[in-house]
């Protein structure tokens, strides 16, 4: 008898325990805490450290001997705003964003829609083909493109010479170099965007297209009245991520031109890198990275606002 | 998405956190005389296989094992910052002369002045005067000792110059420019000379040759008539279309193909020509630089320093002694084609019998170091940016050079 009572009573505390857990709403916090801890230590804390460092004169001497580090207020920001190279880097970044983001979003969308027309073997192979740049190492890309673009013995200039055209200074003319570098980045960035668009395309129910076909809608009508509106969220997502990655544009100019000729392809990120890791001016580089952070945060906030007002 | 936004700041912030925390550690110098058996760790530039074989001789002589790590030139600065911040470095390191100021301001190098008097091989008088102790060290200290030297000379294609009616290499600036003009008339895609757009030493060499200097009262200045002469000379090659404008023009390829039959470079170019184009043997030669008021060239090269926190000072000094010996210096020239800095090695008959080395040696007697100031990196970049924007973007020379002067003085306040 006593045994049965004990058996019946035993589960009771466990239920009570579970209840308190539910009531306190701690579960979600416990579940996200590992991610939160990582985010705080590796992102939020680092931003604060960078913000503090940006107010100091930390350089390589200061790293070796901490007593050399001084708080210099906003001096780094003042120097930076007076540095023509900073404004040039900012202008270059704006140029890359304006050229690259629309080209990439519209181009990827068009290619994705075209690729979605058929599931035949040829189209499946094409999909893999378009994704290859996204998974190729940047060093390999720089070697290949560097050799294509080379003004002395590059393939592109050789092809031009076959049709009787003079050589183009792909990476060495300050204006053309901007376009050459952006082209490589567009080519490399398109793979990922196309995959995202393809996934979104395949989530659109076929019934809409069938209904539209019954009503006599043509191909263009189907694309602009069904496909594009139903992909609004995917387009928004791709635009935001593409915009952020282009504001942080770094890899292609770093490997292809090191920011040259005469700063023509120096983006903000490359400017920060050069200040921090080439001239060892960590305080100054932190100040520049805080500015870039503020710009990106602002642009992203505006986008989210626009999206919200669009949705409501 | 938030992660993506913050990625940037994060990189620098994390870097700072890690370095500051790591920087709190440290070691002390515990050397114990000749009983110090290492093992030693040394960072060299690039060529680790040749250096390892040189070190095998040292290990045979002293019983001290040496571990060689080759650091690519492009990574030297990263390597230095992490080593300084963490306190974990090698025992010795090769330091390119241009990098000396950063290594010194990072406190990475041990002051050897208390030890050199017991090491006759490391006395400053053994080395070329361009790298005399008082020229490469802050006053009263010996933070590094010379290791290899490198000097700029004129490389020219005898076959192409002869075909253009030029019987001897140019010896004056006027001849240099005239010869370049003659050679550039060979046709499209053919030039007289090649100016590397990354080479900040060239305008400084031209300034020395014009009879001036870029250092005045401990500060770098380009506000001198001699620099103006140098800048005009530099620009004239572009103005008269005697040099390629493409920044990706390859010097070695250009010399081998004949597109640029005259270039100013170091002995390493001789090694690359010999290995890349043995068929050109006898069709090219070297000469001392064309003169204006002077014929001064750039003295480049590397020193060897001892890491400030090494635990093997005595063993490190024995290695420095070994490297300063004539046989080591000559062996190194044989395997790696890098010139000695020790006078005794340079006057050895194995070197003086080679006519090209004779040119190098002559030029080494008239060669100077670039300014060894911590801001030189930034100043030289500003110098290149200004000159390149004049020659490539057509910026106005007077205003661009005026801006350069104010930038340079504001960098040194």
Image (tube, rainbow, N blue to C red):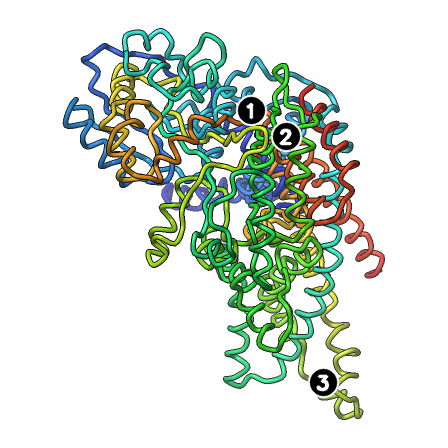
Q: Nearer the viewer, residue A47 or B409?
A: B409
What element does badge 3 sit on?
Answer: helix
Q: Are marks 1 and 2 in contact (CB under 8 Å)?
A: yes
Measured Cα–Cα span from mark 1 to mark 2: 10 Å
- Dot 1 or dot 2, earlier in sequence: 1
Identify which residue is drawn at 45% across, 7% down: B140
Q: Is residue A16 above or below residue B79?
A: below
Q: Which residue position is annotated with label 3?
A: A209
Measured Cα–Cα span from mark 3 to mark 2: 64 Å
Q: Are marks 3 and 1 in contact (CB under 8 Å)?
A: no
Identify which residue is drawn at 39% across, 37% down: B71
Q: Which residue position is annotated with label 2?
A: B379
Q: The residue marked by circle 3 belongs to what chain?
A: A
**Residue B347 locus on image (x, y percent):** 29, 26
**Residue B370 locus on image (x, y percent):** 53, 27
Q: Nearer the viewer, residue B48 or A118?
A: B48
Q: How many marks?
A: 3
What element does badge 1 sit on?
Answer: loop
Q: The residue marked by circle 1 belongs to what chain?
A: B
* Residue A253 placement, left or right of B80: right
User: Can you tell which of label 3 and label 2 is closer to the viewer?
Assistant: 2
* Residue B410 placement, left or right of A3: right
Q: Is residue A20 visible?
A: no
Identify which residue is drawn at 72% across, 85% down: A209
Q: The residue marked by circle 2 belongs to what chain?
A: B
Q: Nearer the viewer, residue B257 or A219?
A: B257
Q: Which residue position is annotated with label 1?
A: B371
């Amino acid at each position: 008898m006593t045994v049965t009572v004990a058996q019946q009573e035993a589960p009771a505390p466990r239920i009570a325990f579970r209840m308190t857990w539910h009531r306190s709403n701690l579960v979600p916090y416990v579940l996200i805490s590992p991610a939160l801890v990582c985010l705080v230590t590796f992102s939020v804390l680092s931003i604060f450290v960078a913000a503090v460092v940006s107010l100091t004169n930390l350089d390589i001497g200061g790293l070796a001997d901490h007593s050399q580090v001084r708080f210099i207020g906003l001096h780094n920001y003042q120097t930076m705003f007076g540095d023509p190279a900073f404004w040039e880097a900012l202008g270059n970044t704006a140029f890359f964003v304006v050229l690259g983001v629309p080209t990439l979003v519209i181009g990827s969308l068009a290619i994705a829609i075209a690729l979605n027309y058929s599931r035949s073997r040829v189209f499946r192979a094409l999909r893999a083909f378009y994704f290859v740049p996204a998974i190729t190492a940047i060093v390999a890309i720089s070697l290949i493109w560097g050799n294509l673009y080379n003004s002395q013995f590059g393939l592109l200039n050789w092809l031009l010479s076959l049709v009787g055209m003079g050589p183009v200074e792909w990476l060495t003319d300050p204006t053309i170099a901007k376009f050459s570098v952006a082209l490589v980045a567009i080519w490399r960035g398109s793979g990922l965007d196309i995959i995202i668009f393809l996934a979104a395309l395949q989530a659109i129910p076929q019934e809409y297209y069938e209904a539209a076909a019954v009503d006599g809608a043509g191909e263009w009508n189907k694309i602009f009245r069904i496909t594009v509106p139903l992909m609004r969220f995917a387009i928004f997502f791709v635009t935001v991520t593409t915009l952020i990655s282009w504001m942080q544009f770094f890899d292609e100019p770093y490997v292809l031109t090191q920011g040259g000729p005469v700063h023509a392809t120096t983006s903000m990120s490359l400017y920060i890198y050069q200040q921090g890791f080439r001239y060892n001016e960590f305080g100054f580089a932190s100040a520049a990275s805080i500015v870039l952070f503020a710009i990106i945060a602002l642009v992203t906030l505006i986008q989210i606002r626009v999206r919200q007002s669009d949705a409501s | 998405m938030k992660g993506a936004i913050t990625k940037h700041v994060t990189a620098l912030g994390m870097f700072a956190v890690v370095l500051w925390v790591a920087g709190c550690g440290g070691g002390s110098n515990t050397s114990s005389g000749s009983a110090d058996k290492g093992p030693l760790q040394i960072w060299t530039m690039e060529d680790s296989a040749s250096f390892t074989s040189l070190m095998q001789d040292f290990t045979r002589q002293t019983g001290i094992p040496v571990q060689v790590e080759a650091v690519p030139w492009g990574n030297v600065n990263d390597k230095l910052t992490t080593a300084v911040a963490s306190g974990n470095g090698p025992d010795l390191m090769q330091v390119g002369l241009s990098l000396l100021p950063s290594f010194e301001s990072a406190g990475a190098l041990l002051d050897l002045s208390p030890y050199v008097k017991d090491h006759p091989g490391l006395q400053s008088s053994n080395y070329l005067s361009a790298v005399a102790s008082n020229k490469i060290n802050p006053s009263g200290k010996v933070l590094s000792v010379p290791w290899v030297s490198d000097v700029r000379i004129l490389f020219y294609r005898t076959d192409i110059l002869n075909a253009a009616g030029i019987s001897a290499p140019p010896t004056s600036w006027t001849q240099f420019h005239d010869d370049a003009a003659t050679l550039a008339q060979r046709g499209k895609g053919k030039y007289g000379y090649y100016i590397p757009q990354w080479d900040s030493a060239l305008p400084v060499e031209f300034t020395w040759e014009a009879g001036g200097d870029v250092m005045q009262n401990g500060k770098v200045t380009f506000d001198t008539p001699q620099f103006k002469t140098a800048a005009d000379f530099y620009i004239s090659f572009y103005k008269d279309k005697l040099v390629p404008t493409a920044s990706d023009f390859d010097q070695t390829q250009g010399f081998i193909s004949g597109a640029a039959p005259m270039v100013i470079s170091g002995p390493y170019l001789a090694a690359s020509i010999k290995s890349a184009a043995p068929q050109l043997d006898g069709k090219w030669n070297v000469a001392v630089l064309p003169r204006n008021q002077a014929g001064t060239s750039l003295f480049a090269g590397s020193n060897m320093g001892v890491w400030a926190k090494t635990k093997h000072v005595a063993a490190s000094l024995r290695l420095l002694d070994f490297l300063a010996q004539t046989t080591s210096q000559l062996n190194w020239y044989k395997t790696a084609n890098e010139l000695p800095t020790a006078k005794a090695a340079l006057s050895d008959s194995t070197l003086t019998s080679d006519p090209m080395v004779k040119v190098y040696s002559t030029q080494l007697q008239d060669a100077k170091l670039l300014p060894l100031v911590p801001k030189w990196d930034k100043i030289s970049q500003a110098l290149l940016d200004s000159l390149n924007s004049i020659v490539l973007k057509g910026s106005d020379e007077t205003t661009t050079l005026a801006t350069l002067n104010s930038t340079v003085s504001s960098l040194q306040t």
